[in-house]
Amino acid sequence: MGYEIFGKDMMELYSDSTVKDQEKVDTRSETEQTDEVVTNRLEGRNAVLEAIKAGRTIDKIYIQDGLRDNVLSQIISKVKGTGAVISFVKKERLNDMSETGHHQGVIAQTTSYEYSDIEDIFALAKQKHEPPFIIILDEIEDPHNLGAIIRTANIAGAHGVIIPKHRATGLTATVVRASAGAINFTPVVKVTNISKTIDELKNRGLWFACADMSGEVMYNCNLTGAIGLVIGNEGSGVSRLVKEKCDYIISIPMKGDIESLNASVATGILAYEIVRQRSK
């Protein structure tokens, strides 16, 4: 059984909002030569914890070995699964790294890479005279996967990638390197609630296809028009609440002996099925 998508007039899909200017920073990290990303240093427990709560992407975090308290436990818990590198080091190492002399047993490096706004995605689609094509990631934790997906999104002509604020990797230095420069051309938007964002985008004319092995084979689905492709977590897939928001479920035909594909590989296959159908 196939699926049909009846899009609105393309011009109705866009907002008149002006695209925000984004300044790209091009210097290097103090502790790792990247040539791609600048990192800012935060020192002290409250400074680091508040930055995490505010949604800043932590690239690396250094914690004094053997030191534990409630705040440090919160910091460790919140950065797990976000792609941040956690290193337990001697107090002397932190003393050498500290610029303030008051590190309180923790120093973090945050990635200074600008996130885009949803309006930037619509503006890019409008500029290309194409119906919007957005890839939405539900709790992707591996920074290599996120970087590869951003690279695929750019090559496949997607107008942007949306990621959640919590329980997912952000734009770490690893992500930027894995994107092979695509991050400079593909808007990446961080949102608080994926389900709510899908509802908002539906009101602007998008239809949503969720990747799941239980779905209809992708060749039988109409993936043309204004569309959002939803990809789930590496282990658990798309969450139930997000899946319920999608208009239909699509799958990749499996012919081998194992049952699943890497998240970035699956994204590439489904994205290029969208490209194939659009090219008609």
Image: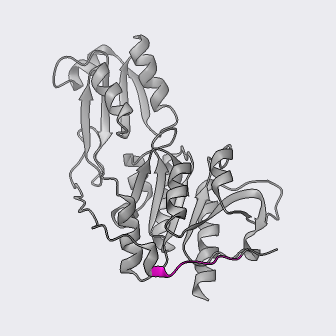
Q: Between 128 and 97, which is closer to the camera in this rendering?
A: 128
In what quadrant of the picture does the C terminus appear?
bottom right
- What residue is shown at x 34% (from left), y 39% (from top)? 56
- What residue is shown at x 27% (from left), y 25% (from top)? 47
Q: Is residue 105 magenta?
A: no
Q: Which residues are magenta?
A: 4-10
The extreme bottom residue here reads: 280
Q: Is residue 20 above or below residue 275?
A: above
Q: Is residue 68 above or below residue 30?
A: above
Q: Between 6 and 55, which is closer to the camera in this rendering?
A: 6
How many labels, in total?
0
Q: Is residue 246 above or below residue 28?
A: below
Q: Between 27 and 127, which is closer to the camera in this rendering?
A: 127
- What residue is shown at x 40% (from left), y 81% (from top)? 128
- What residue is shown at x 80% (from left), y 54% (from top)? 258
Q: Picture quarter containing residue 154? A: bottom left
- Is 45 situated left or right of 210 in this image? left
Rendering coords of residue 114 (x, y %): 30, 53
Rendering coords of residue 245 (x, y %): 64, 54
Rendering coords of residue 215 (x, y %): 77, 61
- Is 26 situated left or right of 50 in this image? left
Rendering coords of residue 254 (x, y %): 79, 63
In what quadrant of the picture does the N terminus appear?
bottom right
- Is 186 situated left or right of 277 in this image? left
Q: Picture quarter containing residue 117? A: bottom left
Main SS category, magenta section: loop
Residue 14 visible in the shown view: yes
